[in-house]
Image (cartoon, helix red, strand yellow):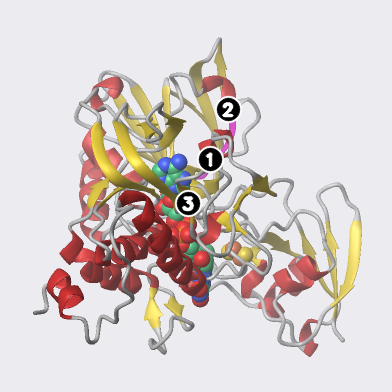
Amino acid sequence: MSNAPIETDVVIIGAGPCGLFAVFELGLLDIRCHLIDILDRPGGQCAELYPEKPIYDIPAYPIISGQELTDKLMEQIKPFEPEFHFNQRVDEIERLEDGRFHLKTDDNQEFITKIVVIAAGGGSFTPKRPPLPGIEEFENGSVHYSVRRMSDFAGKDLLIVGGGDSALDWTLNLAPIANSLTLVHRRDKFRAATDSVNKMLALREEGKINFLLGQMKEIKGENGNLSSVTISGPDGETEVACNRLLPFFGLTMKLGPVANWGLNLHENLITVDTEKFETNEKGIFAVGDINHYPGKLKLILSGFHEAALMAQKANQYIYPDKKVIFQYTTSSSSLQKKLGVK
Amino acid sequence: MPKITFIEHTGEAHEVEGDVGMTVMEVARKADVPGIEAECGGACSCATCHVYVDEAWTSKTGSPEEMEEDMLDFAFDVKGNSRLSCQIKVTEELDGLIVRTPEKQF
Ligand SMILES: Cc1cc2nc3c(=O)[nH]c(=O)nc-3n(C[C@H](O)[C@H](O)[C@H](O)COP(=O)(O)OP(=O)(O)OC[C@H]3O[C@@H](n4cnc5c(N)ncnc54)[C@H](O)[C@@H]3O)c2cc1C
Ligand code: FES
């Protein structure tokens, strides 16, 4: 896919809680944002790692779950019409001659922006790779951690491993086009939605898929082409012939391309000042878990504060001639108008 | 203070003292026991604190609750005595507990 570059004032990399709140602080200053995240929805760690778990240290919320916090932030920033670009990882940032930045994602979407706000948290979410010796060799074609094009799997012998929604959804979607499909899970209980589980059981009943109880032990093939995976289960070992493997073991955070952007780092975190949370590159800011400064605490509330101060400086870059007046949302009629409450 | 022994897959043993109320994961981390990563800091959302409880101790440590059992789906080489060490609370009863750390966390 190759779209025309999107020109904007601010691109925020990462739609975790801190990236989302940055939309609010920038919005109050009439600055609109585009957000890019590798996940398929907003919320970062809160939505991906602990949606149901309670957080007890969000000011004024004695208790709120990761998903609730995300939903509330989305509601709070709605008046500022943020534009989201999900399922994409920002790979490159380059400064243009006119001082603006050129960004490119792994999906070939390009952006030209005056300001970059890096809110990349613990890094991009990346699928967990099963620690099987030699699995890397098969990652150029045989082993896939996600499905971008279903047609890549048509007529193939698939082995899907896992018991969550991804494993089950892809079992259901790919079964009709695969030559054969085997689902492997370590127990006969599935975390996936009940409806998907029932549909999978029906396919199994009709003999359209095979189900095997067990865990991956060994992976075999030649020249990067997978030929079989050995599954060890309650009845011993079974070798399953297959040429495509889809293991679904959740996601982990990896720093990823952030390290290649020419920014000063301290132990894999981007160093910023504590006045405006700007990096060593003028116009590139970093807020939330991804930044470092003396006394940094990796807490959501710290990221919120950082976003507020960052926005003030970004405002000066974007509207150099605008007079800055400090205002409260409680009493300023112009802020309330922007929020759509007046 | 209850003592816990962590045995690495190589056989190397580490005997560590823990406080009642800590989790077995925290005891390991405090003493830098290798083989326990605990990426999520004990929130039962990463499965990188996976251990095997010595068979003699499984009745004392109890069995995983549903949330932990779900999370164990994300661990590697799960066995009948697999537990997430952040979900085992240290008690006086567990003085002498032996757990083995896996060769690889995911
Ligand atoms: C189990 C657990 C419990 C926690 N409990 C608390 C608590 O009680 N209180 C508290 O304050 N904090 C808590 N935290 C920490 C809190 O979740 C983080 O501080 C917070 O999520 C940081 O927000 P963020 O927006 O900086 O980054 P994140 O939430 O990490 O989001 C960053 C986003 O950026 C994306 N990204 C990164 N790089 C790229 C790229 N190159 N291209 C595209 N997208 C990219 C990632 O995919 C991710 O979605 C907890 C964390 C965990 C794991
Ligand atoms: S530390 Fe993450 S699950 Fe135990």
Residue wearing tag 1:
A258
**Disc 2, SS:** helix
Name the subunit of mark 1: A
Residue type of the residue flagged with mark 3: Phe
* Side of B93 where A182 appears, left or right: left
Across and down, in percent, residue A145 comes to: 43, 35
Residue displayed at 32% across by 20% down? A156
- Viewer-side label of 3, 1: 3
Q: In whole angstroms, how far apart are the C-alphas of marks 2 and 3?
A: 37 Å
What residue is shown with label 2?
A135
Q: CA distance from mark 1 to mark 2?
A: 25 Å
Amino acid at circle 2:
Ile
Check disc 1: other Cα within 10 Å, few if <14, some if 14-19, many if 20+.
Answer: many
Which label belongs to residue A285?
3
The answer to whether the beta carbon of the residue marked 3 is less than 8 Å from any atom of ligand 1 is no
Image quarter for residue A71? Answer: bottom left
- Lateral position of residue B22 relative to residue A10, left or right: right
Q: Residue furthest left?
A: A342
